[in-house]
Image: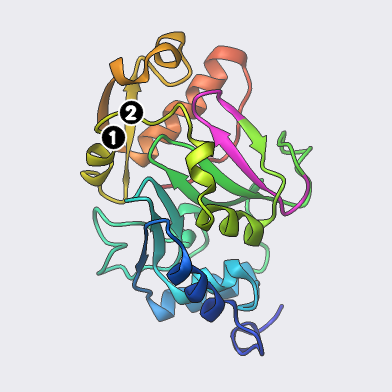
Amino acid sequence: MREIDELIDVEDPAWPLLLQELSDTDVPVEVLPVDAAAARACLGQLQVSARSNLGGIVLGCGGLLVDGGWLRIYGSPGAAGPGGPGGLPGLAEVNAMPASFDPAWRPEAGLVVAHDVLGGVFALNGSDPRRSGRPGGPGEVVYFAPDSLGWEALGAGHSAWLSWILAGGLREFYEGLRWDGGHDEVAALNGRQGLSFFPPLWSAEARRDLSATSRRAVPMAELLGLGRESCLRLDGTDPGFLGAA
């Protein structure tokens, strides 16, 4: 186990470089304020260095709201600030980390690093993805797609995934899953809500005409639960842990 100061006091911390990348991107990104104590606790539990982009985000911000909040990348918000009631939860909460450091704790199948408003999940694979029923290699970012109810390997680690987002990769990634007026609907959500569709995104009706679906704001936990239940009901496959908030 590495002590927290060993994880933080590194020669080449990632956060200053990330801030530069964030200032250079044309993609709308809101950087939320961080809670320093929560950040240290989360980093210590993860045992990742501030030299990594993951460590930099945990230590440097309360989260990143990308494209008006369409995508929420989790960091370490304060309980009284953006991470409070109605605000964005932190990486520790989303992954149900223990309240105090536990050297035996590991993510169940991988670490959830982001959610989108559709109920999609971006996660970092654990050490044995096949055992968890997930594609890709260890440490690779995978995506649970609510329109296909399955995991997809993205062929990139966390740093490359973040650079892809800031380079505008989400435009093509979500092609066919945008609709007129969607920006206003997303802007009306708080950090703990997503959009539930009827007919659901995986249905033939939604695939044929997404704009004709009805949509309502629901707690993200409810939306993730619906995704998991739909997988079990339709093909008997459990996608596993999709996030606790």
- Residue at 72% across, 54% down: 139
Count of all numbered marks drawn on residues in the image? 2
Which amino acid does the dot numbered 1 rest on?
Gly
* Span colored in magenta: 137-150
- Left or right of 169? Residue 212 is left
Figure check: 199 above or below 72:
above
Give the residue pinned by disc 2.
Answer: 179
Q: Position of residue 101 (x, y in %)?
A: 56, 72
Figure check: 169 above or below 79:
above
- The reply to whether dot 2 and dot 1 touch (C-beta < 8 Å) is yes
> Closest to the observer: 193 or 19?
19
Q: Position of residue 238 (x, y in %)?
A: 61, 27
Quarter where residue 203 is shown: top left
Quarter where residue 198 is shown: top left
- Residue at 52% across, 41% down: 121
Q: Position of residue 234 (x, y in %)?
A: 55, 13
Magenta stretch encompasses residue 144:
yes
> Closest to the observer: 57 or 192?
57
**Residue 169 visible, this orientation:** yes
- Residue at 42% across, 56% down: 27
- Left or right of 117? Residue 82 is left
- Left or right of 88? Residue 231 is right
Callout 1: few (<14), some (14-19), or many (20+) C-alpha neighbours within 10 Å?
Answer: few
Callout 2: few (<14), some (14-19), or many (20+) C-alpha neighbours within 10 Å?
Answer: few
Which amino acid does the dot numbered 2 rest on?
Trp
Q: Which mark is residue 182?
A: 1
Figure check: 67 above or below 208:
below
Q: CA distance from mark 2 to mark 1?
A: 5 Å
SS label for mark 1: helix
Magenta stretch encompasses residue 93:
no
